[in-house]
Image (cartoon, rainbow, N blue to C red):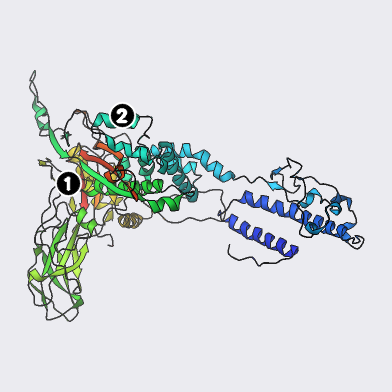
C-alpha cells in the first residue's frame, strides 16, 4: 500500500478507512498488480453488509437502552431493519454469499454491552447485523492453471510464439506461467523433498540395465529433467534448442564417430565437355572425412540444506528451487560450450605493427614495447589477463620498440587475425623497459587498437600457451573459423574474412562484406547459410547500416485497435541472400540471432542443411547426446541419515558433430562502433 490507513475507533472512521483501502487497491488493479474481481467483491461487501450492519447494530442498541427512535431519521421505517433481510447482496450479482447452515450460525454474536445483560432480557439482533460469508474466487489463478498443459506443450516443442499466445502476449503472464509450469513438471516427476529417499535410490545402480530398471520402477520417480530442460531451452539456450539432437548408434566407446560430406570433391566438371560417343565418362569421387571426438561432460553440483528445508516448508519446496536453479545454470553453460568450446590449440599472433600517435597520455620521451596474445572463446569468457592463472591464451608476440612523438602520445597497434581467436590481450611496457616486463593493458575483440595510457596492472603475458583443452569439444566458432579440426583438414574451406578492425560497409542493397562471403559459399559449394550468429551490439550496428542504404522502406507499421499506444525501434531478424534465389525456389532469407554470449567483432555464417544427396545425413550440425539431462545423487546423500544437507548433480554428455565443415565460415575483426 502506498499510503497507510489511519486508525479510527469510530464506526464511520473504520468504514471510511476501508473505503480508502478499496480506492487504493483499485488504482493498483489498473496496473494489473492485483485481482480486480476480488476488489469488486470487497466493494460489494462494504456497500451492502457493512453499511447495513452498522445501521442495524445502532437500532439494536437503541432498543435495548429504551431510546426513542422518533428522533432518528433512519428509524422512520423500522420494519426494514427489524426483520431479517436477505443475505444476498443486491449491488453485485457476481458475489456469492453462503446461507447460514445451522441455527447456531444464524444467531447474532453478542456485543460487549450485551454480554453483561441478563440472558432473559437479551434481544436477538437481526440477521442483517452479521456480515455475510463471501466465497472469494481467484479466477486468475484457476485460469493460469488451466493454461499450463498448453503452455508446456508449446515450450517443450520449441514453439515460443505459441507459448506467448497462451500467455495472451503479456510478459508478466508469460513469466508466471513459466514458473508455474516448472514446478508442475517437477511435481509430476516426484521431485520433492518427500521423495528424497526414492531419488537417492537412483545411485544404487551398477550398470545400464540397473539404471533402466530404477527409472521404470514404481517406487522411483521417473527422470523428468529432460522435459524440464525442453521447457527451458527456448529461453536459456537458443542454439542448443535449434541444433537437432540424436543419440550414438552402434558404438561401444566414449568417443563419437561420424563422416562429413565434401560435396563433389575433386570432380573436374570440364571433363564432361568432351565425352566421346559410347565413352564410359567421368566417375565422381566418393569424398568424405571421418571424425572422432570424445564426448564432453557438462555437470553442475548443488545441495539442499536442512535449514533451507525448514525455512521452505509451507511456502515452496527447496528441492524444486534447487533443481530449477541448477538446470538453468547447466543449460546456460551448455549453450556457451556449443557456441565456443575448443579442443585444439590456436596460434600466437603474427607480426605486430605499431605506429606512434598524438592523442593520449604516453610520455613524449618514452619508448615502449607492445605485446599481443590471442584468446579462445574460453579465454575471453574467463576474462584471462595473463600471468600463471591464464586459460585459453596464446603466447605473446612482441612489437619492435616505438618512440612516441609528442607530449600527449599514443600507439596504434595492428596485426593479422588469428584463426580461431575471438579476442586479444594487449600488454604494454613502461617507459624504457624491455618487452618481457610489459603488463596487461586491455582486451579487445578486433585485431586493431590504440594504446593511450599506461595501465596500473601488474599482470604480465603468460610464459606458456593454454589454448588447447583436452576436455573440450569443437563448438560452432571452431567449425566456422578453423580449417583443421580433430586432425582433419577441410578441403576448399571458405576462408573467414578478416575485416582488420574496420566497420561494416553498406552498399548494393546490402552489406558488402556479407555479400562477398555469401557469393563465395554459393559459387564454391552451391550452398546457402541459414543462420547468422552475432552479438547484440553488432545487430544494433547492422540496423543502422541497413537504414543508411537509401530512401527505401525497411520497416512496416502494424496498426492495432489499442489506442494511446506508440511503439518504436527496429531490429534486424534476417538478411536476404541475393546469390542463392533458387535454393528452394524463393529468395533465401538468413535468420539472425543476436546472441547474448557472442563476443563483438565476429559473425558466424552457419549452413544447417546439406544440399548433397550422397550421404544419409542432410543436417549440417547434430548434437550427439551420450547422456541426457540426468539427476544423480552424490554419495554423501546415499550415506543416509544424519546429513545436514542433500547433495546431488545434474549432468549431460554430448558432442557437436558437423557433417559439412568446408562451407561453414565467418567474418572477424569487425569494429561495431564504425
Residue 30, quarter of picture: bottom right
Residue at the top extreme of this rendering:
278
**Is residue 574 visible in the rendered structure shown here?**
no
Residue closer to the observer: 221 or 327: 221
Q: Name the residue under label 2.
A: 213
Asked if residue 420 can be seen in this view, the reply is yes
Is label 2 in a helix, a strand or a loop?
helix
Question: Mark 1, residues whose alpha carbon is within 10 Å: few (<14), some, or many (≥20)?
Answer: few
Secondary structure under tag 1 reads loop
Q: Position of residue 614 (x, y in %)?
A: 18, 28
* Residue depicted at 20% across the width and 46% down the height: 480
- Residue 398: x, y in percent? 8, 65
Q: Which residue is drawn at 78% across and 52% down?
A: 129
Which disc is residue 471 wearing? 1
Q: Which of 163 and 544 is in front in this view?
A: 163
Q: In which quarter of the image is residue 600?
A: bottom left
**Residue 422, horizontal then vertical, whole percent:** 20, 55
Amino acid at each position: 500500500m502506498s499510503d497507510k490507513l489511519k486508525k479510527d475507533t469510530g464506526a464511520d472512521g473504520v468504514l471510511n478507512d476501508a473505503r480508502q483501502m478499496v480506492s487504493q487497491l483499485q488504482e493498483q488493479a489498473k496496473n494489473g498488480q492485483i485481482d480486480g474481481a476480488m476488489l469488486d467483491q470487497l466493494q460489494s461487501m462494504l456497500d451492502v453488509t457493512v453499511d447495513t450492519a452498522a445501521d442495524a447494530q445502532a437500532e439494536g442498541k437503541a432498543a435495548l437502552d429504551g431510546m426513542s427512535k422518533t428522533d432518528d431519521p433512519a428509524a422512520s421505517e423500522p420494519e426494514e431493519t427489524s426483520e431479517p433481510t436477505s443475505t444476498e447482496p443486491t449491488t453485485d450479482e457476481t458475489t456469492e454469499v453462503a446461507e447460514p447452515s445451522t441455527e447456531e450460525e444464524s444467531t447474532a454474536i453478542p456485543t460487549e454491552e450485551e454480554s453483561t445483560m441478563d440472558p432473559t432480557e437479551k434481544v436477538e439482533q437481526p440477521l442483517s447485523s452479521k456480515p455475510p460469508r463471501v466465497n472469494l474466487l481467484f479466477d486468475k489463478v484457476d485460469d493460469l492453471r488451466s493454461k499450463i498443459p498448453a503452455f508446456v506443450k508449446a515450450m517443450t516443442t520449441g514453439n515460443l510464439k505459441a507459448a506467448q499466445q497462451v500467455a495472451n502476449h503479456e510478459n508478466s503472464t508469460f513469466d508466471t506461467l513459466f514458473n508455474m509450469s516448472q514446478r508442475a513438471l517437477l511435481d509430476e516427476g516426484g521431485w520433492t523433498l518427500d521423495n528424497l529417499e526414492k531419488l537417492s535410490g537412483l545411485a544404487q545402480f551398477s550398470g545400464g540395465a540397473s539404471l533402466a530398471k530404477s527409472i521404470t520402477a514404481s517406487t522411483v520417480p521417473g527422470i523428468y529433467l529432460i522435459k524440464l530442460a525442453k521447457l527451458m531451452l527456448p529461453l536459456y539456450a537458443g542454439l542448443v534448442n535449434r541444433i537437432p539432437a540424436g543419440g550414438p548408434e552402434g558404438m561401444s566407446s566414449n568417443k563419437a564417430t561420424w563422416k562429413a560430406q565434401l560435396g563433389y570433391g575433386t570432380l573436374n566438371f570440364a571433363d564432361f565437355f568432351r565425352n566421346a560417343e559410347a565413352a564410359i565418362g567421368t566417375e565422381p569421387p566418393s569424398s568424405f572425412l571421418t571424425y572422432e571426438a570424445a564426448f564432453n561432460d557438462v555437470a553442475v553440483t548443488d545441495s539442499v540444506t536442512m535449514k533451507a528445508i525448514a525455512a521452505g516448508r509451507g511456502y515452496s519446496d527447496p528441492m524444486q528451487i534447487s533443481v530449477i536453479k541448477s538446470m538453468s545454470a547447466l543449460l546456460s553453460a551448455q549453450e556457451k560450450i556449443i557456441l565456443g568450446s575448443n579442443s585444439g590449440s590456436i596460434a600466437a599472433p603474427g607480426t605486430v605493427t605499431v605506429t606512434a600517435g598524438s592523442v593520449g597520455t604516453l610520455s613524449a620521451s618514452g619508448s615502449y614495447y607492445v605485446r599481443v596474445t590471442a584468446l579462445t572463446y574460453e579465454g575471453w569468457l574467463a576474462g584471462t589477463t595473463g600471468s600463471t592463472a591464464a586459460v585459453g591464451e596464446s603466447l605473446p608476440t612482441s612489437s619492435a620498440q616505438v618512440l612516441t612523438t609528442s607530449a600527449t602520445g599514443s600507439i596504434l597497434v595492428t596485426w593479422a587475425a588469428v584463426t580461431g581467436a575471438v579476442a586479444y590481450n594487449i600488454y604494454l611496457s613502461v617507459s624504457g623497459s624491455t618487452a618481457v616486463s610489459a603488463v596487461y593493458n586491455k582486451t579487445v575483440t578486433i585485431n586493431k587498437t590504440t594504446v593511450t595510457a599506461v595501465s596500473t596492472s601488474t599482470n604480465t603475458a603468460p610464459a606458456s600457451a593454454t589454448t588447447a583443452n583436452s576436455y573440450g569439444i569443437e563448438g560452432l566458432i571452431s567449425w566456422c573459423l578453423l580449417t583443421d579440426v580433430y586432425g582433419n583438414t577441410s578441403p576448399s574451406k571458405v576462408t573467414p574474412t578478416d575485416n582488420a578492425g574496420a566497420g561494416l560497409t553498406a552498399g548494393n542493397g546490402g552489406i558488402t562484406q556479407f555479400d562477398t562471403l555469401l557469393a563465395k559459399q554459393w559459387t564454391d559449394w552451391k550452398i546457402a547459410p541459414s543462420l547468422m550468429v552475432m552479438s547484440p551490439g553488432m545487430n544494433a550496428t547492422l540496423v543502422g547500416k541497413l537504414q543508411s542504404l537509401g530512401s527505401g522502406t525497411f520497416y512496416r507499421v502494424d496498426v492495432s485497435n489499442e489506442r494511446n499506444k506508440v511503439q518504436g525501434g527496429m531490429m534486424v531478424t534476417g538478411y536476404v541472400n541475393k546469390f542463392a534465389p533458387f535454393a528452394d525456389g524463393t529468395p533465401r532469407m538468413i535468420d539472425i540471432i543476436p546472441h547474448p554470449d557472442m563476443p563483438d567483432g565476429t559473425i558466424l555464417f552457419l549452413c544447417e542443411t546439406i544440399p548433397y544427396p550422397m550421404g544419409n545425413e542432410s543436417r549440417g550440425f547434430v548434437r550427439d547426446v551420450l547422456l541426457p539431462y540426468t539427476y544423480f545423487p552424490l554419495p554423501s546423500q546415499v550415506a543416509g541419515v544424519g546429513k545436514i544437507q542433500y547433495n546431488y548433480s545434474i549432468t549431460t554428455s554430448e558432442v557437436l558433430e558437423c557433417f559439412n565443415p568446408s562451407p561453414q565460415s565467418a567474418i572477424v575483426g569487425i569494429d561495431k562502433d564504425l
